Image (tube, helix red, strand yellow):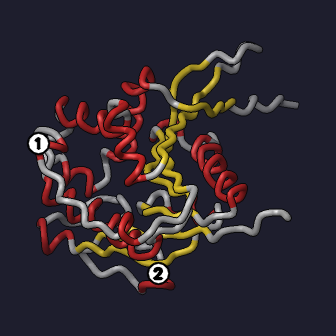
Amino acid sequence: MTTPAPKPRIRIREATRADLSEILDVHFEAFGPDPMNQLMYPAGVTENAREMFGHSLFPPESEAAADENKHGETRIFVAELLADDTADDVPVEIVAYAKWQIFRHERPETEWNVEDPPMTTEILGEGVDAEVYNAFLGGMHRVRKTHSRGDASVNLGILACRSTRQRLGAASALMRWGTELADELGVPSYLESSPYGYPVYKKFGYQDIDVLDLPVTELYGAVKTNDRKWGEDSAVELAGPLAPGTYRSAIMKRPAKATAV
């Protein structure tokens, strides 16, 4: 009788600035093949663009304090793969990370209903197509804001996993942190889903509330030439079949669960 191989061990912990290089590796490996990422970084991710994205994850303390007032309390967690040949919790590598944004109290409209200025290449980094960024990521943020409004909520900003380390339970472990906090606080959770994250979010109880259907072929000339998903399986019941040449992002909500009395 063959003894089954031990299941890989995953540990979740809060990220530190020292983790940033590995987090960036995970991020751009996970999203690199996505057509929208290729449009935003048409010549590849430059060192300056990588640096600027890292700055957005771990800004200086003075910027972080101001950002918290507008974008909530930010918590970033990493999933580490641990060595399976020792009893010690020895990390092998960071295989996934998640960024959560927490609003513990409802906010007045004067705080949440504020138009963000468009992002520029100077902010995003050399080689980034700011027009695509604003239409895609900016568009998703605007759609989500019409639903989340000033809700007290626990929102998923980013979830990324190394393509070579999928199906180890890392993404699910990171999701549990945020959904359990939302349940503890008795608040809803919102997110914007890529075609590849969609099945994971459905498993955790997120429901379709809207979509951003971006006519990519019409706007940018990109066509679907490989097996990459463009959102054809996302929110079909809500928004209908995906039109040819269109990339769909699903806006999703996990309803609040009543807190114990």
Q: Are marks 1 and 2 in contact (CB under 8 Å)?
A: no
x, y percent for residue 230: 34, 66
- Secondary structure of the residue carrying tag 2 is helix
Q: Quadrant of the N terminus?
A: top right
**Residue 29 visible here:** no
The disc label shown at residue 122, or none: 1
Q: Quadrant of the C terminus?
A: bottom right
- Secondary structure of the residue carrying tag 1 is helix
**Along the line of sight, the residue nearer the viewer: 120 or 231:** 120
Of circles 1 and 2, which is in front?
A: 1
Q: Is 36 displayed left or right of 67 in the figure?
A: left
x, y percent for residue 49: 20, 37
Q: Is 139 displayed left or right of 238 in the figure?
A: left
- In the image, residue 44 sits, relative to residue 155, either above or below, namely above
Q: Residue at position x 64%, y 67% from top?
A: 205
Q: Residues under labels 1 and 2: Cα distance?
A: 37 Å
Type of the residue with mark 2: Val
Q: Is 182 displayed left or right of 166 in the figure?
A: right
* Quadrant in which residue 66 is drawn: top left
Q: Is 1 displayed left or right of 127 in the figure?
A: right
- In the image, residue 17 sits, relative to residue 29, either above or below, namely above
User: Label 2, on which residue?
Assistant: 236
x, y percent for residue 260: 83, 63
